[in-house]
Structures are given as C-alpha cells and as structure tokens.
Image: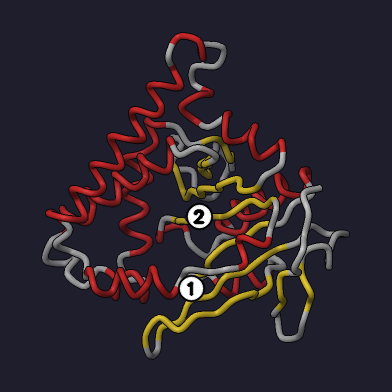
Amino acid sequence: MLIRPLSRPDLPAVSQITHRAFSHDELFTWLYPHQDKYPDDLRRYQLIRLRTRLVQKGSHGFVAESEEGDAEWSGKPEILGFAFYIRGGRDEKAERWREDGWFESMFSGLKDSGVDTQAELERSLLSWEIWYEETFLAHASSPANLRLFRQASDYKFYSLLPSYWHLGLLGIDPKFQRRGIGAKLVRFGQDIAREEQVPVTLEASVMGRGLYAKLGFLVVEESAIVEGLDGVAMVWEPVGREGRWLVRGERGKGEVKMGLKVM
C-alpha cells in the first residue's frame, strides 16, 4: 500500500469516499438531516470543502492507494482512504509547512511569477463559494445544528500548544474499513510529528475514538453538543516525550499544560 500526497486529480475519488464514509455517521446525520432529500447539495458542498482543504495554508492531504500484491488490488491503483493534516504553531517549521502547501509546491521556484497571488485568489474565491453554498444552497444541513456544533467544539487547548500537527479529516472507503488503513494514515502523520518532536491533535468521531486511543491519543477536552451526542478532542505525544505537553491522567485522559514555549 502506498501513502502519497493528495493531488487535485484525486478529488473526485476522495469526494466519493467522503460521502460514503460519513453519510451514516451519528454526528454527520445530525448535522445533515436532509441529506437523503438533497444528496446533490451535500455532495457539491463536500467537494468545495475538500478543494478548500487542498489549497489552505499549512494543510497537507495524503491518500492510501492500493498497489499490486495488496489484498485490495483490483487490477489498477485505487484510493482506499485519505487524511488531511494541518500544521499549526508559531515555530519556523510551521512557517515552512505553510509556505510548502499543495498549490505552492506545484509551482516550486516560481514565486516571483505570481503563484502566491494565484493561491490567495483561489482561497478567496472558495471562501465566497462556501458562503454562497451555506447561505442559499445548503438544503441538506440544519443551520441550527451546525451552530450548536461549532459552539460546542470551540476547544480552548489549541491556544496552549505552541506547535502541533492537527488531523483535520480522516476518511476510509467503507469497502476497505477494518483493514488497518485508517491506522496507517494516522501513523503516517505521527511519524511526521515525531520527526519534528511535536504533538498531534484531533477531534474524534464516535467511530474513531477506539482507534485513536489504541494509537496513544489521550482525551483532553470533552463537550456536550446535545443530549446523547458529545464531542471529544484528543492529543498524542511522541514516544519518549510523554509529559512534555500533557499532564497524563487516568482512563485515557490528560490535560494540556499551561505556559508551554516554542521549542
């Protein structure tokens, strides 16, 4: 199995995986209760969000792709799952990752020819596109539920971490779930963070919490969205650096330390 950077031609396949992977998720169905009635609206919005992630500063997408000899091999390479990681922080490496996003790296060495301006223009156009979708075309969603979710998931611990990688989105095609593909994509991000000696953060779905706990993530914040539906934020520390960012508690929980400084 190959893990490689996600590129623009991958977006249609990744969009399909996003729709299939999350359409029955408990949180997702609460946020988008009308998705069965307006499937095209939801698919269009998901694609716009993926396009935005692709050009966002500091955002880096990766896909898990089948190779010949894999159990998943169908005669040609196939995208099995994907992950988006975002580099946060105030250190020099964070600044480098923000400069080396997908759009800029496709035109490396051409910064003086207006590539930065093109990237900013695309981000600006996408922000307007999202606004228009959410204001006039978001028939599949519940605006009230989206507001409640955004309020409940306004986690405070991020401001305490001077540097980190954030797993913003992880999606595995349902046909290939429970085969370790999600774990490989998470470990891929952990390996990058380990090299830089920074933690990894994420906000876990109900389905993903067990996986993340097995991979060493600790719960650092919990929020009640509505009765019966809660949110969980988790943090992983590189092996050998346990306790650098977290006060480690019991039952898979921890607390982010105050007064952390850039290393």
Asked whether the viewer can see residue 66, the reply is no
The number of callouts visible is 2
Q: Residue at x 62, y 35 (%)?
A: 97
Disc number placed over residue 168 in the picture, else none: 2
**Left or right: 249 as drawn, with respect to 148:** right
Give x and y (percent) for residue 98. 57, 35
Q: Distance between the residues labelled 2 and 1?
A: 15 Å
Where 111 falls versus 247 (above or below)?
above
Q: Nearer the viewer, residue 63 or 236?
A: 236
131 to the left or right of 162: left
Residue at 46%, 56% in the rendered image: 172
Residue that appears at 48% across and 36% down: 6
Q: In this view, does 243 lie above or below 86?
A: below
Give the residue number, with chain letter if any, for mark 1: 207
- Front-most of residues 74 and 112: 112
Coordinates of residue 263 in the picture (x, y in percent) = 81, 47
Which numbered tag is attached to residue 73? Answer: none
Toward which corner of the image does residue 192 lie, by quadrant? top right
Q: Left or right: 217 with respect to 145?
A: right
Left or right placement of residue 95 versus residue 71 in this view: right
Q: In which quarter of the image is the N terminus?
A: top right
Question: What kind of element bears circle 1?
Answer: loop
Amino acid residing under circle 1 = Met
- Mark 2 or 1, which is nearer the eye? 2
Residue 187 visible somewhere in the drawing? yes
Q: Which of 66 and 221 is in front in this view?
A: 221
Q: Position of residue 111 (x, y in %)?
A: 51, 14
- Which residue is at a point 40% across and 61% down the rendered structure image? 174
